[in-house]
Structures are given as C-alpha cells and as structure tokens.
Image (spheres, grey):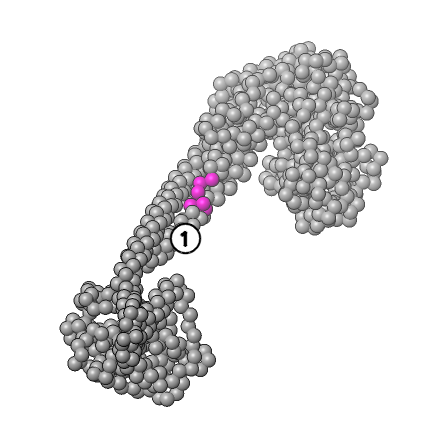
C-alpha cells in the first residue's frame, strides 16, 4: 500500500512537471506563421532595394518615363519596414531588441535613400525636359537668328552650345562640362549685347542649357549616392540577426519539447508502475485472504471440533448414564458442556470482532471507566480461569478517578494478554501486570517468564489466525492478539512486544483516554 | 498594371507567407514584374476596381459624411470634398468656406488619391491613414480634439456597424482604416483618355492635338503615370518666378516648411491632373480660377514657354479627356 502511495505521488509530481514544461513549451514555441511573416519581410526588404535600384536606373536611362514603378516599390518597402519593426513575439526581449536595432539602422538608410530618390525624381523631370527642349528651341530660333542682322555669330554660338551640351551628356566628363559652360557664357554674352528680339529668342535656349549643364552632373551624382547606400546590406543584417534569434528560439522550443516528451514518458512509466504496484498489492491481499481463509478453516476444524466433541461426548454420556450417575458426576459433565460452549462463544465473538475490525467497522463505545476497578475485576476473572495455583502479581498506579475508554475492548485486551501469558508459561512462573494511569492515557504492561516469541514470528504477530512457530502444540486460535491489537488501534493507542525465546515476553499497551461521555 | 493589381500582388505576398514551402523564393517570385518601357504613352488607365472590402468602404462612406468627427459636430469630410463637385469644395460654398477664411491651401480633390505617392501639398503624409489625422485634428479645419474624443463621439451609434465591417471595436485604427479604405475606393475610371490608352476609342481631334502638345512642350515631364502627376515633388517656378512680383507667403514655401531645407523652397507635390477640368480653382493657393489660366501659367513658369491661345485650347481639350466616371456617372456632369 505504501509503495503504491509513493508511486501515486510520483505520478502527480510528474504530471505537474509535465504541465509546467508544456506551458513553457507553448510560450517558447516558434509561431510558424510569425516566422514566415518576418523572414519573408526580411528577404523582401533586400529584394525591394534591388528593385528600387533597377527602377532608378531605368528612369535615368530613359527606359521608363513615369515614376509609378518607383512609387510602387516604395509602397511595398514601407509596409515591409513596418513588418521589420515588429520582430516576432516568440523571441526573447534581448533578441527582439537586437533585431530592432538592425531594423532601425535599415530604416534610417532607407529613409535617406528615399530622400535621395525624391530629389532624383524632381531633378530628373526638369533635366529630361530641358534635354528635350534645348535642341528643339535651338532649332526654332536658329533660322530667325541667321536672318537677323548681326545674328550669325549668335547662331553659331547657339549651335556650338547645343553640340557641346550634347557631347557632355553623351559622354560625361568634367572637361566637356567646362567646355559646355564656356559656350553657355559665350551665348549669354552675345545675346546680352544683341538686339532685344534676339536676346529674348535666345533666353529660353540659355535657360535650358543652364539646366542641362547644372543638373546633368547633379542627377548623376544623386544616382551614384543612391547606389552607394547599402540598404540591401542592412536588410541582410536584419535577416541575419533574425536568423540567429530564430535558431536560438528553435533550440529553446526543442529543449522544452524534449522536456514535455520526457515528462510524458515519465508519467506513462510511473502510471504503469502504479498500476503494477496496485495489482501486486491486490494479488498479495488476495493471497493473504486465501491464507487467512485456509487458516480459518484449519483453526475451526481444530478448535471448534475439540469443544464440540467434548459437548457431544458429555451429552451422549449424560443421555446414556445420567440415571445411574451420581449428581456430582452429572454436574461435572454439565460443567464440561458449559465450558466448551462458552469457549466456542468467546471464539465466535472474537472472529466477529476481527471481521468487523478488518472491515473497518469496529465501533468504539467510550464510557466512564474506573481503571483500577476494571483491572481488579479482570484480574479476578483471570485468576478464576487459570486456578489458584498460578501466580499473578498486580501493581496498580492509578487514581480512582473515572476516565473515558471502551470498557469492553479494554477487557478483551487485558484478558487476552493475561490468559496468553499464563498459557505460554510454566505453572511455577509468575505473570506480572503493571497498570499506570497517567493524565492523558493508560499504560498496561503484561510480563511473563514463558517460552517467548521467535523473532521471525514477530512481524505477523498481530495478524489474525497467526500463531507462533513454537506454540503449535498448544491449543489456540491465533485470534487473541489480533483482537487485542485491533482494540488498541481503535483507541488510537499502540501495542508493543519485547520478547526473548525461553526467557519470557512483555506486552506493553498504551491507550489514550477517549473524548466522550466521561 | 495599375496599383490595384499591385495591391493584389501585395496581398498575394502576405497570403504567400502562410504557405509552407520556401517562402524566400515565393517572396521574390511574387514581386510585381518590372515595368517595360512605353515611352510614347507614359500613362496607365485607371482600373475598374481595386478589390476593396465593400463593408469597409460603406462604413468609410458613412464616416466621411459624419459631422460628429469634427469638434463642433458641424463639419464632415464631405463638406470640403463634395463628390458631385469633383471631390473638392462645392463652387457655391467656395466664397465663404472656412478653408478660405483660415486655411492657406487650396483643397485638393479626394478622387483617385489611391494613386498618389504622398498626401497634402507639402507631401506631409505617406499614407491616407496617416493623412486623416491632419485635417481632422487641424483646429482650423475639423478641430476634432483628440482620437479618444472622436472615438467616444462615434462609439454609441457605430459599434454595430464597425463590427459588421469586421473591426473588433470602434477605435482610432479602425476609423482611420475605414475612411482610408473609402477614399481608396473613390477612383474615376473610364475617362476618354483611359479608353484611348486601352485602345478602345481614339481621342477627339482637339484632345489628340492637345495630347501631342502635352508631351512635346514638356508637361509630361512631371504629369505622368497612372494619375497624370501625383507621384513626385517639383519646384513651382522652374523657369520663372511664379508669384508674378508678389511676396511669397509662408504657404508658398511648400515642402521647405516641413523639411527646413532651402532647396525645398517652393517645392510642392505635383498634383494629379485626373478630373482637373472639374476641380477648379488651381494651384496650392487656388490662384488660377480657370483651366486655360492654369495651363498658360504652367507653360510660362514651369516650361518657359509662352503658349498661344490655340495651344492652350488644345491642351485644355486634352485635359478634359481626363475627366472620369464615378459610380457610372461622368464627373463632368454632362451625361457623357
């Protein structure tokens, strides 16, 4: 029973551990959807940056002439950065902070790039317009310049300006830019000194040339600055930081999952053990019951048969010879019948009492008892049973006050211990009963100088139908000590035995006074 | 490929994240394909539908018309963005409109904002969701107070409708999302120019002539893409002083007010020319009352070109072909 209780406790502990580790495993678990969201955002951030560079290059090269492509990439980039700012919740605070730092760095570079791209769009729009408008306007003014008086040098200068700006834009170099600027100043100076109509016609050409010369290099510088910003590298750093954290989170989750599996295994193993222990205890109890039954049968066949045969033979004798026998002889046989029947009744009482005790139905009936009076009555009773030749020493140390005990059970205990003491000792020895009535309980001690109890019999001494191995030739039911022990236990007391084979035995009983009517 | 299909691609990307296999490859393979050059037509037609959640669009419409969004409970978004009037301030209300009294900027149209790259004249806001807080919290516009106050004003009567639209509760995020979703739904497909781009119908002769001019004189440098503008910043007055002698005021400094950079002075978000014929007045300060005035002014200060009356007329004819349809009715109001 103890083993199964221990195993049961271990099962509960293992279940608690399972619950705890399951909770940890649940919180540490890597949320797959969240993981996909974040890792997709991290790789998308790199992809989008490459796409942005491509869109900028396309715009610069004139392969597209609207900015919707750039706007679309920014839209995606903005939502992606919002995602990157929210690392998954299954990471630790430190991991999230580390990733958030990288994401913030990425966002800063992205913002810088965005400003540059906006500048690029603004400048490129104007540059592209002037690149187209410059030759167009020059073509428009050249014929009228050539027709105007003193217009020819201006026309030649305008032609030169168009050629040099074209050269500068087709194969950009600082030298070509300087040469184009020189032509621009030349046209400007000639126009300033020319007629007002010529000046007005040339003014627009000069403005567009100015835009081309100024902004062509500026736009290309912006493009170089855009391409130099390593947004992709920062996005890759975010992805790497997240990859590391995710790996650590997976290992943590695995650890807790292993914990859960281990706890499940432990619970299953302990559960199986619990069942085995319970089954074994059940089997042991059944075996014990079987032994008990066989002992009961052998006991009854022996112990009931003896008084019954006495009763039967005396009854037969009385029936056959009662007329011829003296009154004294008849009385002797009647007494034998009575004694045998009384012994059987006592035995049945004990069997029933044991039965009730084993079933847990032994009822205490506390009542006011004067300990000294009770002991003296019992002692007188026992003396009359064993005869005047046996010596019984009594030592009572109890006040005359009333205490609360179940008198019937205490009587059982005393009578059992005392009759046993006489039964298992020689006629010339003395049995000593010491009674001490304390404040809270009583101590009863019965000492004999008898055959003693072998050590191997002591563990099962108080079990029913169990008898000492050195007492088999003496009559007995094996019930007396069992009843005594149950009675003491019912009082919440204890019974102890000290014994030496061949020297004697001492039973000590301690019973606390009961609460109840006293 | 419009931004609608673009949104679909984004959606696919997100959905792709929940699929088990090799998300890295999936992510890259599902990016929208790079555009191929169509230099002769740097435009795209507006798609018929952006695939928005109709329940959220409907909730957003109710909120757009809801004066309780404002502090005094008297101004709704729709008061300055009248859908029957090109998505701008109704003409009859213009003279005594609160924005005219107090606000320095001409109200931009709410149509086709889904395709703009940033919002308001200074490009302050990156998304419509962010932008909503601008006019709502501006003391001179809707003076809504704070978001908790707005939510408290809406909550009693709107809780059920937000739930029906799939929002967990009435809160700042769901109000922003619903209204932005509605604004994205305000697209005007099927302008004559869109039908031309799709190869369904030629432009009328005068508009076709204007379209050639639009490209040849350089308008197209900035006004390109699906929204014919709305996707970059540009300086107002590239070739000449646009203020014609007057002192520029704070609003005229545009982007510089936000960035503090000197080179951003007089830089504005280039407005979309979609429906421009029905969204007078023009420019950030509303200084041009008519389309011919606006075209002439742009030719002058942006391109350094003095346009003839015939050229202006042709360009205006082209710009009229940019007037689309909202809910099966032309914004031009002429039943076309």
Q: Nearer the viewer, residue A288 or A313?
A: A313
Residue at 67% x, 48% y is B147
Question: Which chain does the numbered disc 1 sit on?
Answer: A
Check the image and report above or below for B303 versus A508.
above
Answer left or right for A428 relative to A95. left
Q: Residue at label 1? A: A16
Answer left or right for A232 relative to B263. left
In percent of width and height, residue A187 lies at: 60, 20
Residue at 39% x, 54% y is A12
The magenta stretch is A24-31
Check the image and report above or below for B188 versus A430.
above
Q: In this view, which residue lies farthest toward the bottom?
A: A400
Check the image and report above or below for A182 versus A304.
above
Answer left or right for A174 relative to B236. left
Q: Nearer the viewer, residue A162 or A429?
A: A429
In percent of width and height, residue A213 lies at: 56, 24
Q: Nearer the viewer, residue B129 or A62?
A: B129
Residue A185, can we see it? no
In percent of width and height, residue B247 lies at: 72, 39
What secondary structure do most residues of the magenta stretch adopt? helix
Q: In this view, which residue lies farthest toward the front?
A: A324
In which image quadrant can residue A186 be found? top right
Graded by Cα atoms within 10 Å as few (under 14), some (14 to 19) or many (20 or more), the crowding at tag 1 reads some
Residue A467, can we see it? yes
Residue at 48% x, 44% y is A89
The answer to if B264 sits in the magenta stretch is: no
The answer to if A27 sits in the magenta stretch is: yes
Residue at 44% x, 82% y is A518
Q: In this view, which residue lies farthest toward the left?
A: A502
């Amino acid at each position: 029973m103890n083993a199964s209780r221990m195993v049961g406790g271990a099962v509960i502990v293992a279940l608690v551990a399972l619950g705890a580790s399951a909770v940890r495993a649940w919180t540490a678990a890597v949320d797959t959807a969240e993981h996909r969201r974040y890792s997709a955002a991290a790789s998308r951030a790199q992809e989008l940056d490459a796409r942005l560079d491509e869109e900028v290059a396309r715009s610069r090269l004139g392969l597209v002439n609207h900015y919707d492509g750039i706007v679309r990439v920014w839209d995606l980039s903005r939502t992606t950065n919002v995602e990157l700012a929210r690392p998954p919740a299954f990471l630790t605070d430190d991991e999230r902070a580390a990733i958030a730092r990288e994401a913030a760095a990425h966002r800063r570079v992205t913002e810088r790039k965005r400003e540059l791209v906006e500048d690029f769009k603004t400048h490129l729009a104007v540059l592209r317009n002037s690149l187209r408008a410059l030759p167009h306007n020059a073509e428009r003014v050249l014929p009228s310049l050539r027709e105007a008086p003193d217009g020819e040098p201006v026309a030649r200068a305008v032609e030169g300006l168009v050629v040099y700006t074209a050269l500068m834009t087709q194969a950009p170099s600082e030298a070509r830019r300087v040469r184009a600027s020189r032509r621009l100043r030349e046209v400007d100076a000639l126009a300033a000194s020319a007629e007002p109509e010529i000046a007005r016609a040339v003014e627009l050409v000069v403005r567009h040339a100015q835009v081309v010369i100024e902004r062509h290099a500026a736009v290309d510088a912006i493009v170089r600055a855009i391409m130099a910003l390593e947004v992709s590298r920062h996005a890759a750093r975010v992805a790497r930081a997240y990859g590391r954290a995710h790996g650590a989170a997976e290992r943590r989750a695995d650890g807790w999952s292993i914990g859960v599996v281990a706890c499940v295994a432990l619970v299953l193993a302990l559960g199986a053990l619990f069942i085995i222990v319970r089954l074994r205890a059940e089997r042991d109890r059944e075996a014990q019951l079987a032994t008990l039954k066989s002992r009961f049968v052998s006991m009854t066949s022996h112990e009931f048969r003896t008084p019954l045969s006495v009763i039967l033979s005396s009854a037969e004798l009385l029936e056959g010879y009662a007329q011829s026998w003296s009154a004294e002889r008849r009385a002797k046989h009647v007494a034998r019948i009575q004694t045998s029947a009384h012994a059987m009744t006592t035995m049945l009482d004990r069997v029933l009492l044991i039965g009730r005790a084993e079933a847990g139905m032994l009822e205490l009936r506390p009542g006011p008892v004067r300990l000294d009076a009770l002991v003296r009555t019992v002692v007188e009773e026992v003396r009359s049973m064993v005869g005047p030749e046996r010596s019984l020493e009594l030592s009572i140390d109890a006040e005359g006050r009333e205490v609360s005990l179940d008198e019937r059970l205490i009587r059982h205990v005393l009578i059992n211990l005392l009759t046993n003491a006489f039964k298992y000792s020689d006629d010339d020895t003395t049995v000593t009963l010491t009674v001490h009535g304390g404040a809270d309980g009583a101590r009863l001690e019965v000492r004999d100088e008898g055959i003693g109890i072998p050590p191997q019999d002591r563990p099962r001494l108080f079990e029913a139908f169990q008898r000492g191995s050195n007492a088999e030739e003496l009559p007995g039911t094996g019930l007396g000590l069992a009843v005594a022990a149950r009675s003491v236990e019912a009082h919440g007391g204890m019974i102890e035995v000290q014994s030496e084979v061949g020297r004697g035995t001492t039973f000590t009983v301690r019973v606390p006074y009961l609460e109840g009517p006293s | 490929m419009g931004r609608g299909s673009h949104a679909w691609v984004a959606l696919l990307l997100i959905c792709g994240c929940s699929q088990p296999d090799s998300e890295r490859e999936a992510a890259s393979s599902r990016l929208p394909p790079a555009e191929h050059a169509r230099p002769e037509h740097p435009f795209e037609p507006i798609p018929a539908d952006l695939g928005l959640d109709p329940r959220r669009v409907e909730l957003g419409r109710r909120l757009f018309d809801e004066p309780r969004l404002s502090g005094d409970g008297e101004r709704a978004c729709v008061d300055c963005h009248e859908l029957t009037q090109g998505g701008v301030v109704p003409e009859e209300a213009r003279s005594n409109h609160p924005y005219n009294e107090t606000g320095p900027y001409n109200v931009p149209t709410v149509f086709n904002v889904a395709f703009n790259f940033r919002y308001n004249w200074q490009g302050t806001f990156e998304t419509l969701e962010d932008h909503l807080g601008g006019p709502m919290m501006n003391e001179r516009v809707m003076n809504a107070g704070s978001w908790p106050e707005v939510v408290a004003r809406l909550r009693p009567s709107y809780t059920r409708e937000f739930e029906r639209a799939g929002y967990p509760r009435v809160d700042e995020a769901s109000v922003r999302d619903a209204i932005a979703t509605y604004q994205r739904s305000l697209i005007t497909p099927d302008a004559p120019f869109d039908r031309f781009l799709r190869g369904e119908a030629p432009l009328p002769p005068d508009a076709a002539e204007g379209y050639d001019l639009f490209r040849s004189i350089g308008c197209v440098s900035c006004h390109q893409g699906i929204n014919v503008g709305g996707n970059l910043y540009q300086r107002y007055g590239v070739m000449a002083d646009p203020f014609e002698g007057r002192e520029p005021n704070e609003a005229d400094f545009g982007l510089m007010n936000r960035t503090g950079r000197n080179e951003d002075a007089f830089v504005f978000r280039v407005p979309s020319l979609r429906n421009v014929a029905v969204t007078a007045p023009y420019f950030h300060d509303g200084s041009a009352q008519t389309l011919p005035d606006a075209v002439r002014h742009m030719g002058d200060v942006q391109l350094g070109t003095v346009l003839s009356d015939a050229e202006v007329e042709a360009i205006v004819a082209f710009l009229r072909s940019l007037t689309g349809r909202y809910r099966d009715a032309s914004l031009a109001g002429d039943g076309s």
